[in-house]
Image: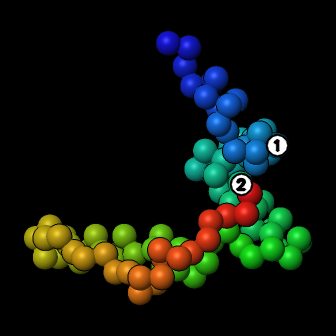
Amino acid sequence: MTGIAPYKEKYGHKLWKEEGEAAKGRGHGGMDFIMFYRLVQCMRDGLAPDMDVYDAASWSAPAALSEKSVAQGSAPVKFPDFTRGKWQQRNGASI
């Protein structure tokens, strides 16, 4: 096998191609930098951010749900649908 390099070149996101060097060593494999860079880019260009309050809630929920599960003897805990089913109509990122 030739490794991941050919796939990165073919399928890698343009932000990684453009800002990957600047992102190196910046936390979580550079993803912290990329996420912050994109948020600032959206603000500067007057675009809606790629993430919204529902994303923030979904990204934060696993910690609290895990704590609840552990307190209940590792019982499964239902993951809430913060969008009340509207996640099915949401648009993806513009890039």
Q: Which disc, if any, is residue 41?
A: none
Give the x, y percent position of residue 3. Answer: 55, 19
Give the x, y percent position of residue 65. Answer: 30, 75
Task: Classify 10 Å Cα crowding around label 1: few (below 14), some (14-19), many (20 and above).
Answer: few
Residue shown at 13%/76% (left/top)?
72
Left/right placement of residue 49 relative to residue 79 reads right
Kind of residue at disc 1: Glu
Residue shown at 37%/70% (left/top)?
62
Determine the residue located farthest toward the bottom in the rendered image. 84
Closer to the camera: disc 1 or disc 2? 1
Kind of residue at disc 2: Ile
Determine the residue located farthest toward the top in the rendered image. 1
Left/right placement of residue 23 relative to residue 90 reads right
Q: Which of 65 and 41 is in front in this view?
A: 41
Q: Is mark 2 on a helix, strand or loop?
A: helix
In the picture of the structure, the residue carrying the numbered disc 1 is 18
Q: Nearer the viewer, residue 54 or 10?
A: 10
Give the x, y percent position of residue 25. Answer: 68, 43
Q: Which of 21 and 39 is in front in this view?
A: 39
Quarter where residue 66 is shown: bottom left
Q: Is mark 1 on a helix, strand or loop?
A: helix
Q: How far apart are marks 1 and 2 (CA)?
A: 10 Å
Q: Quadrant of the C terminus?
A: bottom right
Whichever of labels 1 and 2 marks the residue nearer the N terminus, that label is 1
Residue shown at 65%/36% (left/top)?
11
Is residue 82 something that shows in the picture? Answer: no
Residue shown at 14%/67% (left/top)?
74
Determine the residue located farthest toward the right in the rendered image. 44
Quarter where residue 14 is shown: top right
Quarter where residue 29 is shown: top right
In the picture of the structure, the residue carrying the numbered disc 2 is 34
